[in-house]
Amino acid sequence: MDHKPIHAHDQEFLTQLEECSNNLVEKLQSDNYNEASQLIHTLVEARDRHIFTSVGQLTRALHNAIVNFHVDADLDSEPPEVNNSEIRDATSRLNYVISMTQDAADKTMDKVEAVAPIAMNLGQEATRLRNEWHRLKRREITKEEFKELYNQMGDFLDQMDEGTQQLNKSLQDIILEQGFQDLTGQVLRKVISLITEVEDELVNLMRIAGQVEQVTGMATPGAAQDSKKAVDKSAAEGPQIHADRRDDVVSGQDDVDDLLSSLGF
Amino acid sequence: MKILIVDDFSTMRRIIKNLLRDLGFTNTQEADDGTTALPMLRSGDFDFLVTDWNMPGMTGIDLLKEVRADSKLVGLPVLMVTAEAKRDQIIEAAQAGVNGYVVKPFTAQVLKEKIDKIFERVDG
């Protein structure tokens, strides 16, 4: 991208100005008003040329910066209609991330909910059989009870075989389901690079705007600082990414509990 | 014990619902933001409200304020389960009359602790 400064003409203009003004003083001192007036004319022309060139260059830069946003929009309709833009594309990508993560979470929970009873039943049955087994070791059971235990043990081993196979299958499925991390990660990385690009272009636009103000003499130093965003203390921010680097944010449940108990909770 | 779980993400509602079931609370209902939760609270006989903060429509903090301003719901125990972790926000929730505040991500243990504490205080 072409980021050369737009004031390339300044030096040329300044040299011209210096020459002319020296000449002008000379002419005026020797009462040569005709030539002096002509010199003033040349000066004004040079100044106009300088402004025209600057405006031309700024327009060009502005055009380039806007094209770089990759927004295909119909600006004649009211309100302007966006046909195609990378921002819009990014929005649908992010929605895709939400639906993918939700889908994965749902499937994982489905699997867990489906097999949790199997694990629980096997556990309960094992506890019961172990107690019987201890009674057998202490020779506390009758012949009939032993026969029953013998059959139950066989059944339990069958259940165990079948149940663990189902558990293993579900655990495998749950592992596979984590593949969403890779896919959403790729999508998020794309969106991050788009945001970085857009930021660069915005900085570029701000630079151009600053130059327009300079060329046209509208620049008012310090004006930009007035428009600081009003901060709403209770506006939701979502998860804190850099909680450890901010002191207005708690770093975990213990901090929350401390804060609340300091308030008399 | 009838509990209303309010969160805009169905995954989080499901997690909380599962944890509550493990703690022995099986009678739960769900809403996805304050706007849908408020009429449910007003018409149903809920004993406990678990709500997120950041939701489209009506946020959890506004829901809490509405609940505390409603003469029928003023005493309803409210547990906030949220990713919002600014000190100012926690103080605001406390001042609005929240009964417990859990920051996400949380553990089953923390949720149980806070719920036990709330009912200890309510019953005691």
Image (cartoon, grey):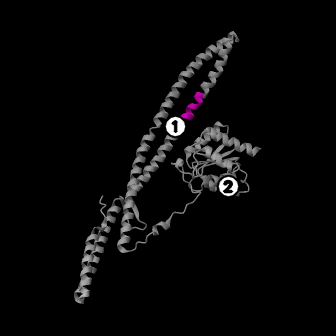
Left-right relation of A224 to B17:
left
Magenta residues, dominant SS class: helix
**Residue identifier under label 2:** B95
Tag shown at residue B108: none
The x, y position of residue A190, in whole percent, is 39, 49
* Any part of residue B101 in sight: no
Q: Nearer the viewer, residue B108 or B8?
A: B108
The x, y position of residue A178, in whole percent, is 47, 37
The x, y position of residue A210, in whole percent, is 38, 67
Q: Which residues are magenta?
A: A110-119
- The residue under the point 39% across, 53% down is A194
**Residue identifier under label 1:** A108
- The residue under the point 66% across, 15% down is A134
- The residue under the point 56% across, 20% down is A158
Look at label 1 and name its amino acid.
Thr
Whether callout 2 and callout 1 share a subunit is answered no
Q: Nearer the viewer, residue B10 or A38?
A: A38
Question: In front: mark 2 or mark 1?
Answer: 2
Say whether residue A53 is magenta. Answer: no
- The residue under the point 61% across, 38% down is B108
Task: Give the quarter of the image for residue A233.
Answer: bottom right
Q: Nearer the viewer, residue B73 or B43?
A: B73
